[in-house]
Image (spheres, rainbow, N blue to C red):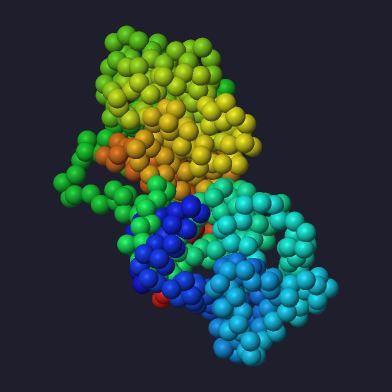
Amino acid sequence: MPAPTVMPVLSVAEMRGCDNEAIAGLGIPALVLMERAAWAAVTLLHTVAPAAGDGANHILILAGSGNNGGDALAMARMLAAQGKAVRVRALPPRSAETIQQTAILQGWPLSLTPLDDLAGLAADLTACDLVIDGLFGIGLDRPVEGLPADVIALLNACGLPVLALDVPSGVQADLGGVLGIAVRASWTVALGWPKPGLLSDPSLAWVGELWVADIGIPPQAGHISGRRVSWPPDAQRLLPVERAPQAHKGQFGRVLLIGGSPTMPGAIQLATAAALAGGAGYVTACVPETMIPAMASRFPAAMFRPQVPSQGTDWDDMLNRADVIAVGPGLGQSSATALLVERLLRTAKQPVILDADALNVACAHPEWVWHRSAPTVLTPHAGEAGRWLGIGSEELQADRWGALERLVDRTAAVVVLKGARTLIGSPNGPQWVNVSGSPALARGGSGDLLTGLIAALLAQGLGATDAARTAVWWHGAAGAVAAETHGMLSATWETVLAALPVAAQRTPPPVAPIGLTKLG
């Protein structure tokens, strides 16, 4: 089964709605969906984690009371049928399907005991090669306490590989936060569709490698969501990599970058380098006049304009020559910067990208942005976005999807909320989550490269939302390539830019035969 081009991200409520429609509306038995989920998880072990699946002959399964536990019990039967030595530790079943799965296991050649004995669990862990986490599913809405918390602590301390079913137990499926304590999974298989919490920064330390399994819920079950995954089958196709034989530079747009200051000369140079590498036909950097000689020798393909007062014929002429304008890298936060940004947003007819210092001086004046008729792209990290919303970065990180929505509503702009899982939102459009990237990008200058790439793609004709999410994906993919070739510590901005062509052409990994899809 080929990977879908567009991957929706479903909230807990949306996923439950799909389940209910498939079962009650379309007549698909709940037990059939449970069997499909279990078989997908078994296939994941053998197909994409062969070292664990084929090398793990002693498997411990932790089953909760609800349907997540039922999925785990069905897995136990399937693995036992394949000759694995399976031990099951289970909480008392509550749902009808989990009760039925428990009954089916009677008489199977496996060990099925209550999950009520920490000493016995510790002994089981020492005798096993791998653990299946089916304790809590997406419905968990309270802190994990008591015996389950002790079980999770013991599991995390044992060092065994863990496959989590749908969500690591203890991770809140909508927001990604940890409800007291959570299982640290090696792999998580999201059943049906990924949940937003699995694709949010707070959960990354717990999810491990994220896979999505098609469990047989058909499209007519109505899985409509305002969230999407931005990933290779979708984002890669938007890159303007092909050019006609008779193409000329005037067809690929004019980028104007405004930034730089005597104390921060580097950021605008990184944005300039990225705009050139991103394929813009013309790139002009408007910088302090003292910076021009050094930049001109470094970037002979670019053009340069000295920073001038943000009014008058020189200013108007400079703006009129551009197809897209990016402002902010290294600009400083003086009163002159505030005047420049206000003047630009009030007069420019082109798309404008606000980054870094331009974001900071504009955050007290959202009306500068929302009154514009041309697109505006904001590129905040958590701290900058928090200033726009009047909240701290910790509060913002606890609900990144909600913060994105509020920032889009506040500005009527395309918002790129940067992070390990960058989110992209736009007025009246879906929210996107990017799944490319690498911790190697967690260094100064990465955001400046992204600004230049967004500007280059906007100049080449992509719409503001498509340019933003495609640039974010491309930037992240190049960071991953640079980390592979140069190491996590040494993947500098030069190596990231050099990796852009490889990232643009890289083919996604093959998909497992029954519809397992890797995200990230």
Spot occupied by residue 95 in the image (x, y as percentages of width and height): 58, 69
Please provide percent x and percent y for residue 513: 41, 76
Q: Residue at x 33, y 30 (%)?
A: 375
Q: Quadrant of the N terminus?
A: bottom left
Give residue 327's quadrant in the image. top left
The residue sitting at 67% across, 86% down in the picture is 110
Q: Is residue 11 above or below residue 3?
A: above
Position in image of residue 198 (x %, y %): 54, 55
| Residue that protrudes farthest toward the right in the picture | 119
57 to 284, vertically: above or below = below
Looking at this view, name the residue that lies furthest to the top: 312
Q: Is residue 4 visible?
A: no
Where 459 falls versus 182 (above or below)?
above
Query: To which quarter of the image does residue 8 belong?
Result: bottom left
Q: Residue farthest to the left?
A: 246
The number of numbered discs placed on residues in the rendered structure image is 0
Q: Position of residue 435 (x, y in %)?
A: 48, 53
Asked whether, in this view, residue 16 is left or right of residue 322, the answer is right
In this rendering, the answer to whether 222 lies above or below 325 is below
Name the residue rendered at 31%, 50% in the picture.
238
Q: Residue at x 47, y 71 (%)?
A: 30
Mark yes or no: residue 321 visible.
Answer: yes
